[in-house]
Image: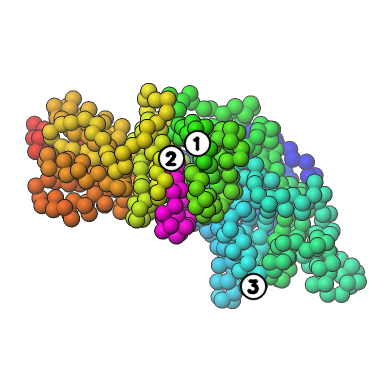
């Protein structure tokens, strides 16, 4: 076997063409595994070039994927990929090659691991740092059931910045169940990794000096050869002797540490994984060094190693990116925050490993001392922000709606109960498209509006977002949050800087007499489209109001809309239990649900919605202009007459 990565010409995958399942990978002769890895890399690149998606992480684990399926008896041996964004090569080898070009598309396979998709995905993921916990749970279940299968968790160095990984290792060290954790160390997260642990991993392999395979094999079993083994006597002693001199952190936590080894070299990977498989000595951590984007020059050369890409030209690496018609919400938020930060040196910004995703890269450049990337550590990030707020700073914690879920107790216990003015900038609110249900920002209005004292805002467009940044900056007696969707704004003229809004006051967008729509958030454009359509087709006039605030509610506005219209329709791009539920509670308490006004709410349905283009997801959620118009028609006499005519 040679360990030189060689990407063959597209379409030439003769060996891969013979592989349907990992059973076939185990039948490939050792000296052909390199070829299989090369072909798998080619197929991964080609597939992602037509679908877009996560590329760099998958390319970095091609050899690891081949080696794991070669050595372990998957699916009986449980293989868990942390985050799951690197699992495309795994999907190709596990019976899903025929659907690999449907990745992340409507009706296609997921861009992450998913239990319902394959028996080779024993645990679903997409949020990071869950693999060691779930793997340990499986190992404990195996022990109770008297099984003897292996459990392997593959976790990146970025994902190792989350507390959950350490909580799991702490527990694993005590349980002493057989568990193999493979630390896939590519010295990258989405952005360059941050924190002391990242520096520690680098020190462990200090500049690329890999252990040779003989040393590493001995680290696991001490059984590299009988004669060597005999010299030392007992394997346990041998391991201690061969481990990193001062003992690694992992060893202190009860793991046997093995490595570091070259994760692109199958000659190293296969014997080491074989030894780990056969060791039967409690938790083992295999430290593997890989390169994100390995084997594809444009990925290797790019600063983000092609973490996430749109469709691209394989020959040039050029990605197909449409020309934006309006600035993205992310950019509007980030620029607005910079403007306020220039005037107010108390403003600080926090991200949990998403400096570019949240747009805070520019803030980091302009105000390096006031910018904090805490790593993939949302829980810590929130309490860290609370600590800063308690000292009089103005922290903006910019976290995607879906990832803030992880820090809910910190939001409640550290922020809300103490009335600390942490400002939550909640990006990717609502349905997000190709990343699917794990990444949908469905729940934030629900889980925040239930907290006493929180101000919860939702931007209906980019100008509103500007105002909400200004408003949050001005709120200094308690927590606040403003949410905004993924993607581009509406292309509105934007003021130089946003203005502070009156807390708990909505705005009237247009007045009519047939029905009223009270909207929260970025479905406003669809509400307007629906009203335009009803006006053109049936001459109906619809009142539209934008609530701006899910908390506190604008009671006066709600009364006015309910009392002056035959029907009131509430629209929001969030889960049940959010804005509409609060409005309905208020209306009930205020005696407005007495039958005089018909009221209906349109929110996300009570299901997890599968990946598709965002518009298609909203249509399936019943939140398109068409569905809003249909609702108005069904609730009004004018509408019913129009339908009958
Ligand atoms: C809880 C959570 N926060 C943020 C993310 C976004 N995210 C996806 S992959 C990733 C980086 C993971 O880095 P690493 O584990 O080193 O894997 P690599 O991509 O380098 O292979 C991040 C931050 C996430 N998936 N989950």
- Label 1, label 2: how far apart the Cα atoms are: 9 Å
Q: Is residue 21 in sight in this rendering?
A: no
User: Which image quadrant is residue 70 in?
Assistant: bottom right
Q: Position of residue 86 (x, y in %)?
A: 59, 47
As drawn, the label of residue 174 is 3
Q: Is residue 60 left or right of residue 115?
A: right
- Residue ranking furthest to the front: 392
Q: Nearer the viewer, residue 492 or 147?
A: 492
Looking at the rendering, the stretch of residues picked out in magenta corresponds to 402-429
Q: Is residue 521 in sight in this rendering?
A: yes
* On-image quarter of the C terminus: top left
Residue occupying the point 55% across, 42% down = 354
As drawn, the label of residue 473 is 2
Count residues near mark 1 (Cα–Cα under 10 Å), then give few for <14, some for 14-19, many for 20+: few
Residue occupying the point 18% across, 31% down = 511
Q: Relative to 532, does residue 142 appear above or below in the rendering?
A: below
């Amino acid at each position: 076997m040679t360990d030189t990565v060689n990407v063959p010409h597209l379409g030439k995958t003769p060996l891969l063409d013979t592989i349907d399942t990992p059973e076939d990978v185990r039948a490939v002769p050792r000296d052909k595994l390199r070829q299989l890895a090369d072909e798998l890399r080619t197929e991964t690149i080609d597939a992602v070039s037509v679908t877009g998606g996560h590329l760099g992480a998958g390319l970095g684990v091609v050899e690891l994927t081949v080696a794991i399926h070669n050595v372990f008896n998957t699916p009986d041996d449980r293989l868990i990929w942390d985050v799951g964004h690197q699992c495309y090569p795994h999907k190709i080898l596990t019976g899903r090659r025929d659907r690999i070009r449907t990745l992340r598309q409507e009706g296609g396979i997921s861009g992450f691991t998913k239990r319902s998709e394959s028996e080779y995905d024993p645990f679903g993921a997409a949020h990071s740092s869950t693999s060691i916990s779930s793997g340990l749970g499986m190992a404990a279940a195996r022990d109770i059931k008297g099984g003897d299968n292996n459990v392997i968790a593959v976790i990146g160095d970025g994902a190792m910045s989350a507390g959950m990984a350490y909580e799991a290792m702490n527990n694993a060290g005590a349980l002493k169940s057989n568990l193999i954790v493979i630390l896939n160390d590519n010295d990258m997260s989405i952005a360059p990794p941050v924190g002391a642990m990242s520096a520690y991993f680098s020190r462990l392999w200090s500049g690329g000096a890999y252990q040779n395979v003989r040393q590493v094999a001995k680290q696991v079993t001490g059984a590299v050869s009988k004669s060597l083994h005999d010299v030392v006597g007992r394997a346990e002693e041998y391991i201690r002797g061969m481990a990193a001199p001062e003992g690694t952190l992992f060893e202190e936590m009860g793991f046997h540490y093995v490595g570091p080894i070259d994760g692109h070299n199958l000659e190293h990977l296969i014997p080491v994984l074989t030894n780990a498989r056969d060791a039967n000595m409690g938790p083992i951590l295999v430290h593997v060094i890989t390169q994100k984007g390995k084997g594809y020059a444009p990925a290797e050369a790019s600063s983000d190693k092609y973490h996430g890409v749109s469709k691209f030209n394989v020959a040039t690496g050029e990605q197909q990116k449409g020309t934006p018609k309006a600035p993205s919400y992310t950019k509007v938020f980030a620029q607005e925050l910079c403007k306020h930060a220039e005037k107010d040196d108390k403003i600080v910004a926090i991200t949990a490993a998403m400096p570019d995703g949240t747009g805070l890269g520019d803030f980091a450049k302009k105000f390096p001392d006031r910018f904090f990337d805490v790593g993939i550590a949302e829980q810590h990030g929130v309490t860290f922000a609370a600590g800063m707020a308690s000292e009089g700073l103005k922290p903006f914690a910019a976290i995607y709606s879906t990832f803030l879920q992880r820090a809910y107790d910190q939001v409640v216990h550290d922020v809300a109960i103490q009335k600390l003015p942490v400002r939550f900038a909640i990006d990717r609110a609502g349905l997000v498209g190709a990343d699917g249900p794990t990444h949908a920002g469905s729940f934030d209005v629900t889980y925040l509006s239930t907290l006493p004292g929180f101000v919860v805002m939702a931007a209906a467009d980019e100008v509103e977002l500007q105002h909400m940044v200004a408003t949050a900056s001005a709120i200094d007696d308690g927590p606040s949050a403003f949410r905004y969707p993924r993607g581009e704004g509406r292309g509105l003229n934007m003021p130089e800087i946003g203005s502070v809004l009156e807390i708990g006051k909505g705005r009237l967008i247009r007045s009519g007499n047939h029905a009223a729509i009270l909207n929260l958030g970025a479905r406003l454009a669809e509400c307007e489209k629906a009203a335009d359509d009803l006006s053109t087709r049936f001459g109906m006039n619809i009142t539209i109001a934008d609530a701006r605030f899910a908390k506190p509610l604008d009671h006066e506005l709600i009364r006015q809309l309910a009392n002056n219209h035959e029907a009131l329709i509430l629209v929001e791009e969030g889960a049940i239990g959010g804005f509409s539920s609060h409005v309905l509670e208020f209306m009930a308490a205020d005696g407005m649900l007495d039958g005089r006004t018909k009221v209906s709410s349109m929110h996300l349905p009570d299901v997890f919605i599968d990946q598709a283009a965002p518009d298609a997801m909203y249509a399936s959620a019943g939140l398109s202009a068409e569905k809003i118009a249909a609702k108005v028609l069904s609730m009004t006499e004018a509408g019913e007459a129009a339908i009958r005519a």
